[in-house]
Image (tube, rainbow, N blue to C red):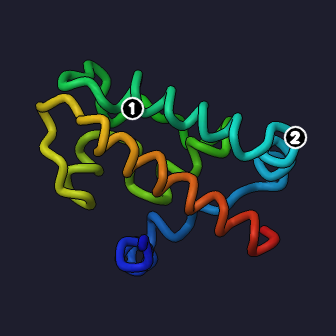
Amino acid sequence: MYDDIFKKLSKSEFRSRFKLKEKDRKYFDEKGFDVIKSHAEDFIKKRIAPAYIPNDGKQTPTKGHPVFTAQHATATCCRSCINKWHKFPKDVELSEKQQEYLVDLIMEWLKRQVNNGI
């Protein structure tokens, strides 16, 4: 389902640089898929979904949580990147369906990272 977007993202030198670090992998193993997914849902809902984000482009750190790494790898880190890569308009609150898509994409990227033994 996500092969097309992952193929496009893989052609970006910036996006393809992001990989799970050992610390992130341990955190993922410790917390489990469901907890990490709940974190992704929370981050998207609070930091990405609002129509207006005062610090857009700076709201997602590049490290410190596996979801942050995944957000940069999947271009779900800010509304500008989401607009460019996923074609969701910038100044409109994201719908539940759009939020679910972003979370599912993040979780699929994480699953692929974990399954590749990174």
> Label 1 neighbourhood size at 10 Å, few (<14), some (14-19), many (20+)?
few
**x and y percentages locating residue 25 in the rendered image:** 80, 52
Spatial CA distance of label 2 from label 1 is 28 Å
Are the residues at dot 2 and dot 1 in contact (C-beta closer than 8 Å)? no
Instruction: Please state if 2 lies on the left or on the right of 23 as rendered.
Output: left
Q: Is residue 29 above or below residue 8?
A: above
Q: Is residue 67 above or below residue 118?
A: above
Between discs 2 and 1, the one toward the N terminus: 2
| Residue occupying the point 24% across, 35% down | 94
Q: Amino acid at mark 2?
A: Glu
| Residue occupying the point 75% across, 75% down | 116
Disc 2 on helix, strand or loop? helix
Splitting the image into 4 quarters, where does residue 79 fall? top left
**x and y percentages locating residue 11 in the rendered image:** 40, 80
The label shown at residue 30 is 2
Splitting the image into 4 quarters, where does residue 22 fall? bottom right
Q: Amino acid at mark 1?
A: Lys
